């Protein structure tokens, strides 16, 4: 099983159940998830270990399992799809082509639900776009934002 599939499985297992079950699952899976986030997510381009990467890595290491459970429990109940059609523009939706949680397919759907949104897929870019491919994010923003 590759890193992306391990990450998907770790996060899928957290959704559903009572808050107590979520906290239990988080405590049990915390090393697995933390390992994926700290080890897997901070490899490749992030191995350069700049200040932003060090900061993000330290924040992930500090996560408490109960906080993780609360976060994912809240995400599981969050549904803003009915509000997206009225979201004020302009809106740029950026997707990382190598993203495994907010996939390009899901981000395309998000962009399609927002009237007049611009969708842009960043090649070879995983989850932490601004840390891993800041030049692509800057280019996309530069092309999207009005000049003047």
Image: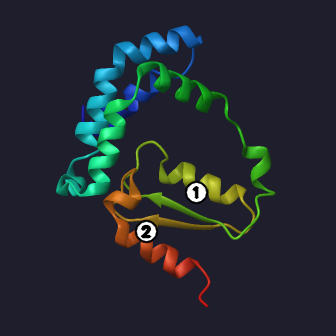
The residue lying furthest to the left in this view is: 48
Q: Residue at x 18, y 52 (%)?
A: 47
Pinpoint residue 11: horizontal percent, then vertical percent.
Answer: 43, 29
The residue lying furthest to the bottom in this view is: 148
Pinpoint residue 51: horizontal percent, then vertical percent.
Answer: 27, 56
Model colouring: rainbow
Q: To which quarter of the image does residue 73 belong?
A: top right
Q: Quadrant of the N terminus?
A: top left
Figure label count = 2
> Could you say whether the residue bearing mark 1 is in a helix, strand or loop?
helix
Of badges 2 and 1, the one in the foreground is 2
Residue 137: numbered disc: 2
User: As rendered, which of 105 and 30 lies closer to the eye?
Assistant: 30
Q: To which quarter of the image does residue 62 belong?
A: top left
Residue behind mark 1: 108
Left or right position of 72 against 113: left
Q: To which quarter of the image does residue 58 belong?
A: top left
Circles 2 and 1: CB atoms closer than 8 Å: no
Pinpoint residue 148: horizontal percent, then vertical percent.
Answer: 61, 91
Q: Crowding near pointer 2: few (<14 within 10 Å), some, many (20+)?
A: many
Relative height, residue 140 to residue 63 (above, below): below
Q: Residue at x 51, y 74 (%)?
A: 141
Relative height, residue 146 to residue 124 (above, below): below
> How far is the residue under mark 2 from the one under mark 1?
17 Å
Relative height, residue 104 to residue 25 (above, below): below
Q: Earlier in the sequence, mark 2 or mark 1?
A: 1
Pinpoint residue 131: horizontal percent, then vertical percent.
Answer: 34, 58
Q: Residue at x 48, y 58 (%)?
A: 95
Q: Crowding near pointer 1: few (<14 within 10 Å), some, many (20+)?
A: some
Residue 28: numbered disc: none
Q: Residue at x 53, y 51 (%)?
A: 105
Left or right position of 42 against 30: left
């Amino acid at each position: 099983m590759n890193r992306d599939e391990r990450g998907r499985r770790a996060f899928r297992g957290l959704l559903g159940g009572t808050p107590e079950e979520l906290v239990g699952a988080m405590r049990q899976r915390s090393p697995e998830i933390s390992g994926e986030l700290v080890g897997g997510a901070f490899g490749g381009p992030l191995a350069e270990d700049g200040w932003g990467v060090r900061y993000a890595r330290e924040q992930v290491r500090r996560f408490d399992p109960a906080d993780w459970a609360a976060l994912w429990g809240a995400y599981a109940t969050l549904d803003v799809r009915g509000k997206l059609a009225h979201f004020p523009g302009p809106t740029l939706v950026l997707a990382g082509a190598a993203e495994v949680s907010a996939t390009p397919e899901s981000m395309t759907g998000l962009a399609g639900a927002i009237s007049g949104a611009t969708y842009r897929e960043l090649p070879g870019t995983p989850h932490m776009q601004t840390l891993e491919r800041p030049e692509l994010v800057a280019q996309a923003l530069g092309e999207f934002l009005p000049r003047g």
